[in-house]
Each structure stands twice: as C-alpha cells, then as structure tokens.
Image (cartoon, rainbow, N blue to C red):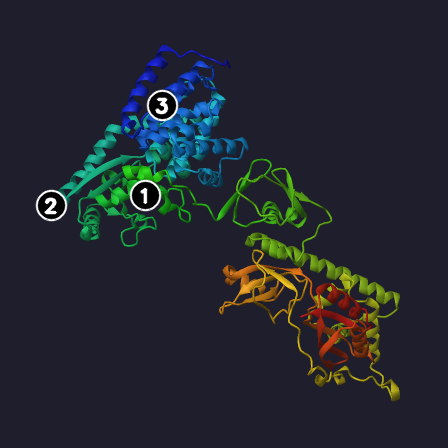
C-alpha cells in the first residue's frame, strides 16, 4: 500500500459532482467560512501525502463525499454531520485533531468526530459482533445519535462500492458485519430502505447463488404477480367506492432477503412462499371515525375473500406500546392464494413509516425499556428543521441501567448496573464463580466485589482453595448469581455435615461408645440445637467440642443420677442482679466525636436502640421523619430494610475522636447450667472493671440462656471481653445483640 496515490479522471469527475450536490443540499445550514476552511483542510491533507486507499483500493475522499451525500438524501442530516463525515479521514490519519475541529467548526462537529473515534476504539477490542448486546453497546457508546446514523450510511455506501472487488475475504467480513450489526441498527432506527439494501447486498455477496436465484424468479413472475395484484384489488376498490370511502391501495413485494429467510424458515423453494407481497389499504378518514372505517373495510374484504382467523392481528382495539395501529388479515384470494391485507388510515400509516412501525419490529427486533419513545424522539428530530438544532444537545442515556463488558476473547455480556466481578464469574460458570478470588479488569487486579463498568475487559482469577461464603450473597446483584451462591453454600453445608458425622462416629468408636441415632437426636435437642445441620456445622467448624458431645451422650444414655447434699447445683435462674444498685447510675453523654456525612461535626444525633452502636463500630446515619439523625451499626438487623426502602435518607458516619464515653451493650449468653457458672461470668466482668447494669437468666433442661447489659467504652474492649467469656467452661455461645 503506497503512501500517496493520484486521483483518476473519473474520480475527479465524481468528486466534483458530489461536492456541488452536497453543497447545494446543505448550503443553507453552512456558517460563514465553513466551506473555505474545509477546502483548505482537505487540500492540505491531499498535498501532504496523507491519503491512502483502503483494502478494496477505494479512494477515502471519494467514499467520504458519497457517504455525505447519502446522509443528506436518505437520512436528512445537515451541516454538522456532513462536515464530520468529510473531515473524519483527516482525523483518522492524524492530520487533524478533534480539538482543532472544535475550534474551527464548533462543539457539535467535534462531538460527532469524538463519537466516531470511540467506536473505532471499541472495534479494536475485537468483540463478537453477532449479538444484540454489541448493537446495544454501540448505541450506548455513541455520544450523539448522528454517530450511529453516519456509521449506517457509511456501511451502505461501502457495500455499494465493493460489488466488483477481488478482495473476497474482506468483502465477506464487511458483508457479515452489515448483516449482523448495521442492518439491525438501521431496523431499530426505522431506516427501512437502508436496512433492506444492507440485507439484500449482504445476501448478494455472502450467498450469491441464492440471491440471483430469487432475483430471477421475481423477474420471471413480475408480470403475473402485478396482474394478480390488479385482479385482487379491483373488486375491493369497487366495493370501497360504493361504500363512499376515500382511500388508496398499494401492493408491496417483499425484499429478496426477506423471501430467502422465509424459504429457509419454511424449508421450501421459491414457489412455496405464498406471501411474496402484501396489500395495503390506506384510508383518508377523520380521527373520530378511524376505527369504524377500518372495521368497515375489514368487513368488505372478508365478505369477498375467506379470512384465516388465526392470522388476524388487531392493533386497533389495543395499539402496540409504541403507538402502532393497524388491522392485519390474511385472506384466500383468486386461484386459492393466501394474501396479507393491512388496513390503516393515513395517520396510522404516517406513524408506522416514521420508524417505530410494529410491521418492522414484529419480524424479530424486540423493543426494550425506553427504546420506542427514544427512537420516536430521534425520528421527530431528524424530520423537522428545528429538531436538527435540538439534536445537537441530544445525548443518549437509553442504557443507563445496564453495563456491557468483554471477556479476554472479546465475547460481550450484559449485566444490570451495580453488578460485580463475582456476578461475571458466576455468569461464565458455577465452578468459576465458586473458585473466584478476584479479577483483572483492563489488566489491573481488582477484588471480587469490584463493580463493573461498560467497556471493561474482565479476566477472572481463581484458586482451588477458595470456597463460597455467606457474605457473597451481599456482593452479587443478579438473581442468577445469588441462586448459584445459595446452591454452593448448601452443597458445602452438606459436605461439612457428612465430614462432621464421620468425625463424630470415629470419636465414638475410639471411646468405645456405641452411637444410636435416636439417642443422638435427643442429645442434639438437649444441647439447644433446633436444627441437626447447625449441630454438625459447629462440629465441622470446631466450635463444638466432640468430647463434650460424647459426655452428654453417655450422661443421657445412662440416665441422670440423683445427687444429694452439697453436690446439688444451684440453678442459674436464681441469679438476679439487684436493680437498686443501678438506681444512682446516670448514663454519660457521649463525648466521642462522630463525623456525619461530609466532615460535619457537632450534628445532633442519637444512638439507635435496636443495635446499640459503640465507639469503633462501623456505623451509618439515618435521617428520621422528625429531622434528627439516628446512628445504626452497619450490621444492624434493620440496616438492609432501611437502605433498601429509604436509601435517600442514609448518610455516611464514622468515629473520629476518642473520649471517655460509656455505652450500654447487651450480650446474649447460652451454656450448661453448671455450678458457679454465673459467678465465673460476673467475676470476669468485675475483673475487667466494667459496670454490669443488669442480668436476666433463665434455666431449662440443664441449659441456661440470658442477657447481660454492660457499660463499655469501645468495640475493641468488647471483643476482648467476649473472648474471655467464651473461655468459661460450660459456655456455648456469647453474642452481641
């Protein structure tokens, strides 16, 4: 490929014709000096040997002018889009910068060029384009909708120019992209003519024999088809005129691509496709009589020709969500041929032709949230002169609730906004998710809770030692990932239970004690477990001593022996703290510093009673109805509901300074009702020089459970206290409420 080429005389002729044509079309929208500056840039670009022919040997300057002409004629864009198209080759080859264009031609032209650059960057990631996700990602990456429109026009033009190329592989790639990407985009935007041309040309280049076979068949049958349409229409026209209706009727032959799709779907030859064309009856009717007139036509047509009731589509009574209204019926015409008849008014036809027609969409392109209204606005802007000015400020926010990310191989996946690396891992495979330790996003190592952003390239990192954890349910956002995490946790629990059971049976054998299932179930209940799975989980975790279980088993198996004298254990329920000792206690006002929201100090707040936060706890603030702020712990049982329902009232909070404040906390303790156990607990609290505000303990079936309210200054000291209480013989659980 050479750095410089000469314009052929034919190319010069074409360029001059196109230049004058485009200038005439957009002349009124050009600003003073636009033409002179553009000619200066393009001349300099040519003179500095910047122009290179593409892989097909085509002149990029000529292509740009052809695309500009198409953008004006078929889509109706004016100054900004045309200047962007003509200057884009200069940007692509580095002759000009977007900033230079912004200074010379304004923000709108620069924004279009910047959008075209972003799309080029997206292509460099080499994603798989045969997906709806990729089309959506292109739309979300385009800062200005005109970027997508220009891309479609550019591809149509390129497809027209490569008819006789010898670069067959390049032609195939371009054609595949046109079929998978650009035709559906044009379909979504209602550019029906361009969409059909892209599909037909793609078929022509990719399946040459099929294209020309159908084309020849259509040519052969054109006269007979036209004659049949005339025979079908004539009696309908006479009856409609007799009924006093104002109307016109037209026949529409399906595109070659559409016929080929029918042949493949129905697995038949050309002659087997019965609906090669459709008849459209369009009424000139006042809005208040539209439905009545449409049903009147329906009655006339079905009186003349037998209808197929399974093929009735009534979008008059209940219009589609995009506003489409019409009656579609299929009737048996002359020579026993099925014919589709569409009945609508001029107004309905205009709505359908503006780009959101259900007639186009029902064939495969499904509407998404916000798409119909958004596309209607786009078409309105394109079709009105005032709309072109509004278009300059129009930016796309259609997919603000979705993110699109790539795998290292270029595959593209869609996730809801807020999805994490862990969601991505479980989307690929359950085994990948279960072993996920983090990821490399754009070659940067991130944790598994990292939130995904559109355009990220994600490579999952795994470890054979990794296991799913309970807190993962709070990390994943998609229901698919949540269900997989729950399943993995359940499977892990089952495995741990089997391991624990085997361990227990082995220990019983070592102690030469025969284990009976009925007695073991009694032991599990006596030890305070409601679920057998919880019992085995604690054995697997090592939090429950196996020897203690065997001792309890032997005790129950042999039966409880009566005890006498001083050996009688005093019940823990007899321990009640004298509340009179606390009557003189006054809770200190907190002199610790709590920073709320953005470094705001001195704000009035209260500590929530539901979770009793203390200094050092991770906390957040919640603005109450009265306007005050209540401080909750992050692990407060009410926190998820508060954040879910009233997220807008949640403010950040953190501890900043340490004072001499004391906080009331409640500990829940469960254990064996052994002699002196309560004394042992209160002794530890006394030795720690902590104030025990109240104690309330119940005893039942050899177990005790109770609440201790203690004054303490921070969570570090609390953790230390809880560890010491857990070391007391007979204590099973110590938890903060």
The residue tagged 2 is 242
Measure how far apart labels 3 and 1 are at the Cα level. Answer: 29 Å
Instruction: Indicate the position of residue 169 as horizontal and vertical percent values.
Output: 49, 22
User: How packed is label 1: few (under 14 Cα within 10 Å), some, or many (20 or more)?
Assistant: many
Q: Earlier in the sequence, mark 3 or mark 1?
A: 3
Up the image or down, 65 lies above or below 440; here it is above
Q: Secondary structure at mark 3?
A: helix
Residues 512 and 165: in front is 165
According to the image, label 3 marks what residue?
A: 66
Which label sits in the foreground, 3 or 2?
Answer: 3
The quadrant of the image that shows the C terminus is bottom right
* Residue drawn at 34 percent across, 21 percent down: 36
N-terminal-most mark, 3 or 2: 3
Q: Secondary structure at mark 2?
A: helix
Tell me whether circle 3 and circle 2 mark residues in contact (CB < 8 Å).
no
Q: Nearer the viewer, mark 1 or mark 2?
A: 1
The residue that disc 1 covers is 357
Mark 3 neighbour class, 10 Å CA radius: few under 14, some 14 to 19, many 20 or more: many
In terms of depth relative to the viewer, which is nearer, 362 or 382?
A: 382
Q: Looking at the image, is 274 positioned above or below residue 686?
A: above
Q: Nearer the viewer, mark 3 or mark 1?
A: 3
Viewer can see residue 596: yes
């Amino acid at each position: 490929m050479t750095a410089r080429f000469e314009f052929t005389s034919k190319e010069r002729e074409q360029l001059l014709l196109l230049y004058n044509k485009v200038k005439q079309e957009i002349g009124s929208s050009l600003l003073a000096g636009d033409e002179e500056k553009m000619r200066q840039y393009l001349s300099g670009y040519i003179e500095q040997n910047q122009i290179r022919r593409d892989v097909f040997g085509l002149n990029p300057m000529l292509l740009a002018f052809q695309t500009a002409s198409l953008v004006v004629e078929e889509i109706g864009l004016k100054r900004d889009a045309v200047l962007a198209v003509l200057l884009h080759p200069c940007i692509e080859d580095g002759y000009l910068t977007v900033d230079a264009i912004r200074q010379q031609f304004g923000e709108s032209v620069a924004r279009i060029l910047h959008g075209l650059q972003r799309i080029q960057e997206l292509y460099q990631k080499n994603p798989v384009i045969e997906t709806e996700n990729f089309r959506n990602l292109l739309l979300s990456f385009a800062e200005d909708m005109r970027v997508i429109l220009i891309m479609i026009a550019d591809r149509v033009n390129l497809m027209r120019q490569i008819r006789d190329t010898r670069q067959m592989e390049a032609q195939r790639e371009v054609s595949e992209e046109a079929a998978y990407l650009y035709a559906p985009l044009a379909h979504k935007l209602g550019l029906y003519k361009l969409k059909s041309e892209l599909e037909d040309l793609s078929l022509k280049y990719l399946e040459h024999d099929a294209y020309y076979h159908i084309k020849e068949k259509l040519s052969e049958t054109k006269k007979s088809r036209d004659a049949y349409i005339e025979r079908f229409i004539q009696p309908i026209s006479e009856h409609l005129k007799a009924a006093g209706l104002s109307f016109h009727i037209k026949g529409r032959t399906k595109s070659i691509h559409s016929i080929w799709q029918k042949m493949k779907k129905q697995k038949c030859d050309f002659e087997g496709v019965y609906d090669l064309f459709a008849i459209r009856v369009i009424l000139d009717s006042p809005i208040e009589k539209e439905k009545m007139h449409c049903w009147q036509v329906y009655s006339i047509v079905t009186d003349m020709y037998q209808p197929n009731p399974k093929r009735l589509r009534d979008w008059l009574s209940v219009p589609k969500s995009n506003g489409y209204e019409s009656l579609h019926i299929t009737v048996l015409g002359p020579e026993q041929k099925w014919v589709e008849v569409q009945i609508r008014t001029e107004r309905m036809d205009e709505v359908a032709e503006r780009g959101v027609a259900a007639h186009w969409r029902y064939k495969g392109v499904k509407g998404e949230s916000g798409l119909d209204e958004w596309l209607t606005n786009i078409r309105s802007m394109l079709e009105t002169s005032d709309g072109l000015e509004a278009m300059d400020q129009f930016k796309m926010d259609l997919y603000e609730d979705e993110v699109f990310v790539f795998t290292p191989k270029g595959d593209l996946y869609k996730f809801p906004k807020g999805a994490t690396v862990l969601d991505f891992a479980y989307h690929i495979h359950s085994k990948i998710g279960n072993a996920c330790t983090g990821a490399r996003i754009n070659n940067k190592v991130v944790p598994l809770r990292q939130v995904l952003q559109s355009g990220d390239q994600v490579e999952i990192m795994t470890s054979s030692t990794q296991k799913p954890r309970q807190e993962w349910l709070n990390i994943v956002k998609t229901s698919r990932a949540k269900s997989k995490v729950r399943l993995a946790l359940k499977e892990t629990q089952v495995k741990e239970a089997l391991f624990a059971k085997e361990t227990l049976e082995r220990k019983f054998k070592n102690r030469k004690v025969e284990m009976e299932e009925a007695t073991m179930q009694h032991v599990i209940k006596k030890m305070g477990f409601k679920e057998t799975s919880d019992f085995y989980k604690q054995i697997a975790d090592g939090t429950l001593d196996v020897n203690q279980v065997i001792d309890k088993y032997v005790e129950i198996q042999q039966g409880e022996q009566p005890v006498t004298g001083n050996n009688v254990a005093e019940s823990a329920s007899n321990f009640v703290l004298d509340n009179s000792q606390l009557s003189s206690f006054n809770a200190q006002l907190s002199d610790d510093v709590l920073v709320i929201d953005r470094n705001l100090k001195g704000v009035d707040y209260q500590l929530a009673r539901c979770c009793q936060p203390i200094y050092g706890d991770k906390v957040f603030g919640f603005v109450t109805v009265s306007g005050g702020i209540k401080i909750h712990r992050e692990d407060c049982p009410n926190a998820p509901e508060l954040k879910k329902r009233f997220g807008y009232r949640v403010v950040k909070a953190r501890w900043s300074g340490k004072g001499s404040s004391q906080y009331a906390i409640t500990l829940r303790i469960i254990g064996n009702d052994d002699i002196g156990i309560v004394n042992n607990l209160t002794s530890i609290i006394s030795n720690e020089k902590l104030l025990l505000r109240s104690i309330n303990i119940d005893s039942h079936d050899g177990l005790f459970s109770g609440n201790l309210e203690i004054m303490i200054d921070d969570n570090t000291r609390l953790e230390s206290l809880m560890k010491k209480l857990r070391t007391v013989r007979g204590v099973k659980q110590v938890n903060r409420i």
